[in-house]
Amino acid sequence: MGSLFERITDWIKEGLIDAITGQYTSIFNSVNNQVADVANQVGQTPQGWNGGVFSMIQNLSETVVIPIAGMILTFVLVYELIQMILEKNNMHEFDTFNIFKWIFKTFVATYLLTNCFTIVMAVFDVAQNVVSQSAGVINGNLDVQAALSDLETQLEAMGMWELIGLWLETNIINLCMWVLSIVIFVIVYGRMIEIYLTVSLAPIPFSTMANREWGQMGTGYLRSLFALGFQGFLILICVAIYAVLVQSIPSSGDVHGAIWGTAGYTVLLAFALFKTGSLSKSIFNAR
């Protein structure tokens, strides 16, 4: 009878060890996938991330938004001319050079408006170049086999009830990692959606740059473009820090600590990614 009970216990322990090993592997594979996916996504330009969406946004901007921006530009330039005339005592003290200056300003404003999409994409090309050069320093590939080399020995030394508790832990952590991966997905992909929305309205703030008062809208828009572009660089730094931190976890020798440590660092990563948007905006909007 005792032999039968021992066999049943050993069979349960083997099943638990296989289940825990599988969960353990899934957790660290999730780390590898998250690091690789985030590094890949932030290195994409708007036109490279999704060509179909980019073409649609560009078409909407050129056919719907630019005509509205043209009317705004006309109003701004007329307002600028009227203001310039009134400032010179109804042209009694008017300098002819001011007319040439206004014509030149009109030419520059029209050129900026007609080429605003090219200028906007140039901002993201510069940011993407910085991100691409930085991506090579990230090494987030955890050696899962090395992490598992000592795991089975530790598990075999545990009792059945301790294995059941560890199995529950790994299931909870695996579920948390899945939820966190969704959060990270939303943050990273949401940034690209925000970029497309911001780019679609580019002609309107560009149309205000000809006037000193209205031009604050255009300069603020340019700041937001640089903030969105270089937010990818901040995200990449967060991922690089995360990759370095989790590298030492599998070799710690503590199964419980490795699992909970990985989950804790992933929570910190999600929080840091969430803060990159406000941080980049505060940097580029600092006065």
Image (cartoon, grey):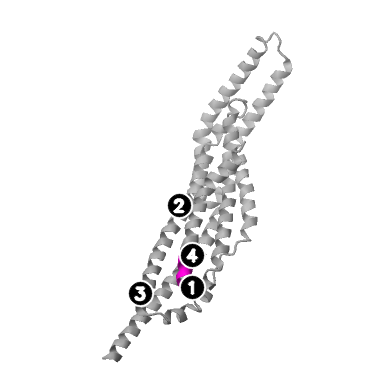
Badge 2 element? helix
Labels 2 and 1: the sequence-earlier one: 2
The N terminus - image quarter = bottom left
Give the residue at x 40% y 79%: 158
Horizontal placement of 104 versus 71: left or right?
right
User: Which mark is in front, 1 or 4?
Assistant: 1
* Disc on res. 164: 3
Q: Which residue in the structure is indicated by mark 1?
A: 254
Query: Which residue is label 2 attached to?
Result: 186
Q: Quadrant of residue 182?
A: bottom left
Inspect the image, locate mark 1, and give the three-letter code of the amino acid beneath it: Asp
- Please state the horizontal and vertical placement of residue 194, each as a whole percent of the image: 50, 44
Q: CA distance from mark 1 to mark 3?
A: 17 Å
Amino acid type of the residue that numbered disc 2 sits on in the rendered structure: Val
**The residue tagged with tag 1: helix, strand or loop?**
loop
Q: Residues within 10 Å of mark 2 (few under 14, many from 20)?
A: some
Q: Residues within 10 Å of mark 4 (few under 14, many from 20)?
A: many
Label for residue 262? 4
Inter-mark Cα distance, 3 to 4: 20 Å
Structural distance between the alpha carbons of marks 1 and 4: 12 Å
What is the three-letter code of the residue carrying label 4? Thr
5 to 235, vertically: above or below:
below
Q: Quadrant of residue 76?
A: top right
State the image coordinates of residue 149 (x, y, percent, origin top left): 51, 79
User: Disc 4 or 2, which lies upstream in sequence?
Assistant: 2
What is the magenta range? 255-262
Q: Secondary structure at mark 3?
A: helix
Frontmost residue, 36 versus 22: 22
